Image: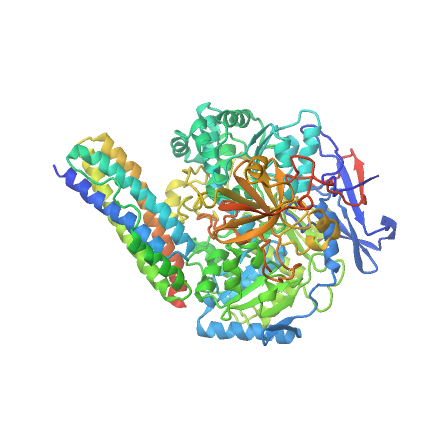
Amino acid sequence: MTRVDRIAEPWGTRTPYGPGEPWPARVDTHLDGGLSSDDVDRWVQTASLLHSNGDAMDIAVKDERIVGVRGRQGDRVNHGRLGVKDLYGWQANSSPDRLTRPLVREGGRLVETDWDTAMGRIVERTQQLLAEQGPSAVGFYTTGQLFAEEYYTLGVLAHGGIGTNHVDGNTRLCTATAAAALKESFASDGQPGSYTDVDHADVIALYGHNVAETQSVLWMRMLDRLAGPNPPQVICVDPRPTEVARHATVHLAPLPGTNVALMNGLLHEIIANDWVDHDYIEAHTVGFDELVKQVQDCTPEAAAQICDVPAEQIREAAAILGRAERLLSTVLQGFYQSNQATAASVQVNNINIIRGMLGRPGCGILQMNGQPTAQNTRECGGDGDLPAFRNWSNDEHVKDLAKVWNVDPMEIPHYSPPTHVMQMMRYAEDGSIRMLWVSGTNPAVSLPELPRVRSILSQERLFLVVQDIFLSETAQLADVVLPAATWGEKTGTFTNVDRTVHLSEKAVDPPGEARPDLDIFIDYAHRLGLKDKDGAPLVKWHDAESAFEAWKECSRGRPCDYSGMTYELLRGRSGIQWPCTEEHPDGTERLYEDGKFFSTPDYCESYGRDLVTGAPVEATEYRALNPTGKAILRAAEYVPPHEIPSEDFPFILITGRTLYHFHTRTKTGRAPELQAAAPDVWVELSEADASAFGIGEGDLVTVSSPRGSVRAAARITGIRRGVVFLPFHYGYWDTEGGHAPDGAGRAANELTITDWDACSKQPIFKTAAARIERTAAGQEPAPAPTTTASAPVRPAGAPTRGPSDVDEELSDRAPEVAL
Amino acid sequence: MKIGLALKELHRSEAELARELLKVSDRHKVDHEVFHLGRDLARWSQEHVALIAEIAHGYGQDLDPDAGGPLGPLERAVEKGSELAGRTSSPSLLMLRDLREVYIKSAGVSVDWELLAQAAQGIKHRELLALAQRCHPETLRQMRWANGKLKESATQILVS
């Protein structure tokens, strides 16, 4: 056993392995000061809730308190490893400022009350609005961090009971594009690939995916391949000098907002050199001719002009992609939150499809998720989708769902796609949404253009309900605040990006009167008197396991089929990948083997959308395009971003998540080791830009866009010229301002633009024009980690360090992995 | 031969569609998708206008390649007004009317492209046919956008 400082060494000790070999195990353990495994009363099974990797772990409980965590060696996802957020983040659960009682607004102030009073107010207001205006007055905005059972229940009560079309999750901000890109190419959500593709791939291409910081355990797997015999070649597309870029064979750093031009350049080269699998294309795809036509003129030189990447590098990358024998492609926010998000991500799918790289070991596509339960919002109808990948524009699917819920199909709104959150904010702004229920998320920090968002959420005429574990920036604006239980205090399941389902069990009681989100939703449905068409309660379940059973029935026969799973199986076996049925009780490792897709017109989840206009494709059009259910190659032209640098705002601003923080820092900001590693906002600049503006390391810089400004200390890094980076989401809960800036802003979203991808409706956080000004000299280096993409180009102050208190137990024995 | 006249009419209707899209964009600046897409889609029509003007030379027409260009100062003032009025619900009805106008205008342009494509086949003018084949799909996409946006917004606007 070794002790490691995992703040200083976030990816820990290497366990090298070669292609096709199993990834050796390494069990990471962190226990509260001085405790050893022998002191622990019991270990309770769960998985990570602070990123989307799905690391399986056990919670250590002593004297009915959480005292630490340990990776689950036998799990297929992490083979015992834990990320830095997993190791330390759990401490936030026992923070003294947890919400323990419901709050209601009285005379402008939030005051403590009991559950009856709080729920009574919500129910009264709901009924009043339903009587006055109908369901269009009510909206729900949830998160990517609750459990499948909770999203499903919310979906049932909102879509099937209240009958509102306004249901979305903050997965809209992180992976709406993942879903949209998969729906465009395969007419259904659900990742084709598996994490084990890392073990087999000879080329791994990461598009706008800073895996080292966002899914650090998946990066450990890649690092271990890179340290072993016959390592894979790595292609990195990212304007920042990330750890991925540092390990890349080719690092392409395009100007933000030009991803489609770059992808079309790569596709042009691959097609021009005939590195394509014609048999696969002929047998399993539609749309190839259109793609060939679209990329015909997009030579590497033409792409280089737009992206400002050397044409030679594009050729080199295309040759690696074109000659790969087992190609794993991954995509994340660098594409999803940028101009033409879906169009760019679909071109990644297109590379794998035309090369026939699907459904075999090492040949995968992972349109990544940003949040741990993002997949579940999409599956369960907790965001802008109908449950179990049903197609809102297919009347038969709606009828089928109505049967599952025992309601009239007319009760389920399906006249248009469910409303996405940015549109909901617009409806709240124009006064037609009058009640908004926010659960487990913090739009007052995470949505773009915060001055606008604050003005919408603080309107008198909007009744705002917030369900959370802390008094977040958004909760401070609420009319009713409901204290929720969190991870470790309630039971449920969640699913990671490679469709692995984990059970997360309750380890300890929630503090005070805090209640599981599931109980809150069920209570609301009952108090509201929601009934099915026979007059029985609409929500027929009462706890996590019975909710899971109901969800299983809803998913039966659909692509995300959970019907073969039980809590008992998940307890015994750790992670299981859907679809899991009676015929496939062990789950399914890869989708689309033998070129079979979920894309026949009668079965598919989506007919797709126009990649530029976002207009939904009509059923008849889809039928004509893809009558027999093949993969769809959708071409896209490059369209410039809506805000480009100008004389007044000469820089391109990008924002992003960093290693030591998650979402709006609700939990990670309350974990001492994580907070100390990156205590405040910073701004990353290139050396050339810094010197042109007379800015030195640590100097205070004001970054402004047409919408607002942020003051931050400068970190001079290897980022490309003309681009500045701000980490999200530093908000105001731990400042004097409370929910808003008190003087200078520090949330990156003060600056971002209200604009979204027309196809996925995902907001664009990575192409805004900005200017910088040096405000004051700095006394010390920027509070940015030195271990990540924000590493300084020249030594600046002390390197990022923490305590050496994580145990790593290495084992070259392959873990016993189910399946 | 009346192809010159058909091109002139198409040039007029494309320019009008471009200006309509820009006007709708300006009028609904607070509806961000309409604002941004209106501008993106106007650009397609502006390109069509320039291409039509170019090919129309051969048919003795002297058409302005820049017709359908950006709005003047008076029309701009409308944009400012929409920002201020954006917090009341009355502009939303106006949005339905405006999108309906885009739908109808783009449908008109679509028919014009069809007529022209027919004529181009009749006289075996490959270049003209290629132009219609390049531009017409974009017109259809403009039309579907307006239609989709109408369907998506109608319920909320009409029931609230």
The extreme top residue here reads A273
The image position of residue A428, as x and y in percent, is 47, 64
Answer yes or no: is residue A388 visible: no
Answer yes or no: is residue B78 visible: yes
Q: Residue at x 65, y 70 (%)?
A: A102
The image position of residue A429, as x and y in percent, is 46, 63
In the image, residue A292 above or below residue A681: above
In the image, residue A619 above or below residue A426: above
The image position of residue B154, as x and y in percent, is 37, 61
Q: Residue A396 or A43: which is nearer the viewer?
A: A43
Q: How is the image coloured?
A: rainbow
Q: Residue A658 or A355: which is nearer the viewer?
A: A658
Quadrant of residue B87 within the rendered picture: bottom left
Quadrant of residue A239 within the rendered picture: top right
In the image, residue A496 above or below residue A263: below
In the rendered view, does A759 fall on the left or right side of A506?
left
The image position of residue A518, as x and y in percent, is 64, 63
Q: Residue at x 49, y 68 (%)?
A: A434
The extreme left residue here reads B1
The quarter of the picture where the N terminus of chain A appears is top right
The extreme right residue here reads A38
Say how many tags the image has. Answer: 0
The quarter of the picture where the C terminus of chain A appears is top right
Q: Residue B6 or A620: which is nearer the viewer?
A: B6
Q: Residue at x 54, y 70 (%)?
A: A530
In the image, residue A533 above or below residue B133: below
In the rendered view, does B75 fall on the left or right side of A726?
left
In the rendered view, does A796 fall on the left or right side of A330?
right
